[in-house]
Image (cartoon, helix red, strand yellow):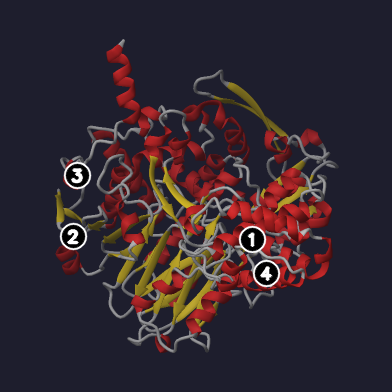
Amino acid sequence: MILVVGFLVYAIWAPWPKITIRERLSAFPVDHLPLALPATIYWNEHQIPFIEAKTDDDAAFLLGMVQAHLRLGQMEMIRRIAYGRLSESIGPWGVEFDYVIRALDFPKHASDMEALLPQETKIWLIKYVEGINHYVENVKKLPKEFSYFALNRDEAWTVRDILAISRLMSSDFNWISVVTYLRLEGKKGFTDYWKDFQGFKDTVESPISMLQNFTKSGSNSFALSPKRTTQGRAILAGDPHLGISLPNLWMIIGMKSPSYHVVGLTIPCVPLVVIGRNNDIAWGGTNMHAWSTNLVNVSNEDSLTWTHRKEKLKVRFWKDQEVTLRETRWGPIVTDIPLLKNTSINHPLALKWMGFEMSDEMTALLHVNKARSWQEFQRAFDTYSVVGIFYTYADRQGNIGLLPAAKIPKRQDHDHLVIDSGETSKQSWQDARRLNRLLSIQNPNDGLIVSSNNRPSKSHWYTSPYFAEPIRHDRIRDLLLEKKKWARSDLISVQKDTYEKDAVVFSEIILSKIKSRNLVSSWTSELKKWDKQFEVNSKGALVFSLLVYRLALEIYKDKVDEKILEVMLASPDLVDHLTTVLETHAQQINFQAIILDVERDFKKFKNFGDYHRLRLTHPLSEVPLFGHRFIFSNLPWPGALQTPMKAKYAFSNRRRKVVFGAQSRYIFDFVGSDENYFMMLGGQDGWFGSDNFDDLTSLWVKDDWAKVPLHLNKVEEMFPYKMELH
């Protein structure tokens, strides 16, 4: 018994066995590869790979192998999610999510897409999945996720899998707002506050909000023309905003073959560079929050024309469940899913989504990877529909640009959710257009392109009711205009900036209200001298956060449903709304009570970093007893909801965990092909205990970059580990 207890204690508390980069690379299967010609993979000390292949087929094959080597466990879980099979891995906790995914039926649409792929794209995808399968079949030891999540080594990867995952990752960002709207409609305070809080997002982890982790739901990206840089060459930079967990969703890669010569960020299960550069152009991107969905009221339609299907959900640790799914000519009936059962909706709603239509994003992005000019870049998106992205652009000729990639129905401009009739939806869909040739901007006079999920200034085509307020956009633009010319090394100051304009007006008004009432507190001096930067050592940022929380409770607690208040506390619109209330209804606020509450809260924390934490964790960190083994960093963290250095959290008087925000960065400098720089939270390798599981976090904390050159002679010089493959 003592031995058993000792073993259990060790299993629970023992650190992960350390695995060196040499040990990890030695696990890569190198024998009997089905390559047409010899190839080489170079690796640097962070396990960033650079593939050199003499044929495109071999490049695609090795890309599949490389991704499987670094992230196979993550890839297998993403595949299960795309097929609505999460409950096979995590048990009954995944059933509600699987219900949603089965209703959306990504694999069905993937099969239709596969049949229409051009031959070049189809061959690339076939070779890519052959690379994944070869790795799985020949690697001696599988990642821990295979045992933790009951994954199956014998399930071969297919092109259909990749296309289904691509549709998962193209999910409409606005579904989160739609679900929140439908769940909150009818609750106390909804009618009074919905339009003032277009940033409403459900704070409870729901099947729809989880999709946010797979889409580029936030981000900043900007381009500077040669007249704006010290070296007289264009620069493109940015930072994607996504859910923060380990492994990071991004990976850094380089690749050279006859048709492709690229470096950049990719995603496991995506067989190309998503954000990157080649010798001629560079591209970044931000989510445009494109409203590519119609909700259709089908209560007046003949239900006999709807299809019904039953599907079995295999549930680990529990009995299997059968779900019934209904589909109309417009799309699945989403009000059938449990997530929307207990709402005020009393009629069936079908979801019509542009992602259910035929489009070809894979070919589009492969063409982007090898584009040589703005014209080729723009033309590449002629087959692209979802997910809507504002692509930023720069090239070695000095051109910069902004291109919206999306296909959007023709709609009237409105600022709220609209539920259509079938005929209205049909007409808007018939008039749908791709935006890459309608709304593009090239070479503006001021030499700046900035995108931060904001509404485009040049927009005669209605794209969304849910754009981000231009606060981040305006701050980045103002910073870039402060200097006539920028060096690449100085741009990190823009990406790290934690200033929030809304905090300025709010702080000034509330201090004046407190002063006019002759009230005093120990924290008011901290707020007065605060520079409005949300830095970890700041006490002013801490006071601001606690004050927003206490003021929101004072104003809204008795006016709105508890669930609506919870959502408001996480909304980026909250500070602006509170400022308006302070200006117009201050006489109704009990400032004395707020001061006392903030006084008590303020004593619990040393500074903003003590209150505002980044915990880098694996999803298994939520498991009782064992979860602590999957917490890898717990850091004081800068940034806020509306700062360029974005860090999303809900206002509270308790310690807050950052769950979403900036988690990678990139800079591409056209002063040379080798001037490509990356930062990333976490690391390249998804293998627990690997030297490269979390090593890039330390670079981020030190404002240091991982450099990835394009020229092979520089790759050979900087990447010390070399695999010769035959």
Question: Do callouts 4 and 1 mark residues in contact (Cβ within 8 Å)?
Answer: no
Instruction: For marks 4 and 3, give the one nearer the viewer.
Output: 4
Residue at disc 3, secondary structure? loop
Q: Could you give the CA–CA distance between mark 4 and mark 1, rounded to whole angstroms?
A: 14 Å
Q: Could you give the CA–CA distance between mark 2 and mark 3, rounded to whole angstroms?
A: 16 Å
Residue at disc 2, secondary structure? loop
Could you tell me the amino acid type at mark 3?
Thr
Q: Which residue corresponds to mark 2?
A: 719
* Classed neighbour count for the residue bearing mark 1: other residues with Cα under 10 Å, few (<14), some (14–19), many (≥20): many
Residue at disc 4, secondary structure? helix
Residue drawn at point x = 18 percent, y = 54 percent? 39
Residue drawn at point x = 25 percent, y = 32 percent? 141
Question: Do callouts 2 and 1 mark residues in contact (Cβ within 8 Å)?
Answer: no
Where is residue 451 shown, x and y percent of the image?
54, 71
Instruction: For marks 1 and 3, give the one nearer the viewer.
Output: 1
* Classed neighbour count for the residue bearing mark 2: other residues with Cα under 10 Å, few (<14), some (14–19), many (≥20): many
Q: Is residue 426 visible?
A: no
Instruction: For marks 4 and 1, give the one nearer the viewer.
Output: 4
Where is residue 251 shown, x and y percent of the image?
36, 54
Residue at disc 1, secondary structure? loop
Q: Is residue 365 left or right of residue 84?
A: left
- The label on residue 506 is 4
Instruction: For marks 2 and 3, give the one nearer the viewer.
Output: 3
Relative height, residue 481 to residue 452 (above, below) = below
Could you tell me the amino acid type at mark 4?
Phe
Q: Could you give the CA–CA distance between mark 2 and mark 1, rounded to whole angstroms?
A: 42 Å
N-terminal-most mark, 4 or 1: 4
Where is residue 9 shown, x and y percent of the image?
33, 23
